[in-house]
Amino acid sequence: MFLLIPGSAVVGIILSKTGRYCPLHAVGFVLSTLGPGLNVLLDKDTHAGVWAMLQIADAVGGSFLLPTLLPAVLASLPEKDVASTTGMYSFLPSFGYVWDITIPSITFQNRFDAVSYQISDPAVRCALGGGRASELSTGAFVQALLQPVKSQILDAYLETLKAVWHGAMAFGATALIAVAVEKHVPLRTELGSKY
């Protein structure tokens, strides 16, 4: 995620020079769909450098969206509505972040409960059930277990994460489809009101 802020600065400059936000939205949502989509290919033996590169793809996608969504919303509005819309826009991401945590958490817990049958130790399976799988996903807990239970838990976590990544990919793809019908409104270059 270290590329999110500098990437947003570069994309903001591109937007201010070109005034074209639709292509930037398309690139952003392609990368935001591709990042989680490629995560589905990861397994427990994947090198850390590979998954780090996949995280970079997702972060760069976010850097295309962060500075371009608000100008796109404001472009079609009369200037008298800009202040209230900007205020509403500052609230909506906060509201969205709640769902950004809630939906993957629910998906994670439900999917883990569905695949936990493959854990042969009933005590460990019970300890991880009922919504506790994410809180016990620390390396210390997993590394303290013996084989074959350790491998079974890693496989269950991997299957669970794939479901979360599929969900993230679906949200990104839905937004990408919306970009296909997004109407370009030229950005204003002059302020024509008292605001």
Image (cartoon, rainbow, N blue to C red):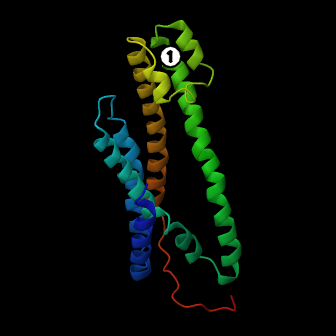
Residue at the spot 48% in from the left edge and 80% down from the top edge:
186
The residue closer to the viewer here, 118 or 193, is 118
Say which quarter of the image contains residue 39: top left
Relative placement, left or right, of 12 versus 52 is right
Relative placement, left or right, of 45 versus 82 is left
In the picture, the quarter occupied by the N terminus is: bottom left
Name the residue beneath numbered marker 1: 116
What amino acid type should be assigned to the residue bearing mark 1?
A: Ser
Residue 77: where, in percent of width, then height?
A: 62, 77
Q: In this view, does 175 lie above or below 135?
A: below
The residue closer to the viewer here, 122 or 190, is 122
Residue at the spot 47% in from the left edge and 62% down from the top edge:
65
Q: Is residue 116 above or below residue 25?
A: above
Using the rendered image of the protein, determine whether residue 181 is visible from the camera's viewpoint: no
Residue 81: where, in percent of width, then height?
A: 69, 77
Residue at the spot 48% in from the left edge and 54% down from the top edge:
175
Residue at the spot 44% in from the left edge and 73% down from the top edge:
12
In the picture, the quarter occupied by the C terminus is: bottom right
Relative placement, left or right, of 186 versus 48 is right
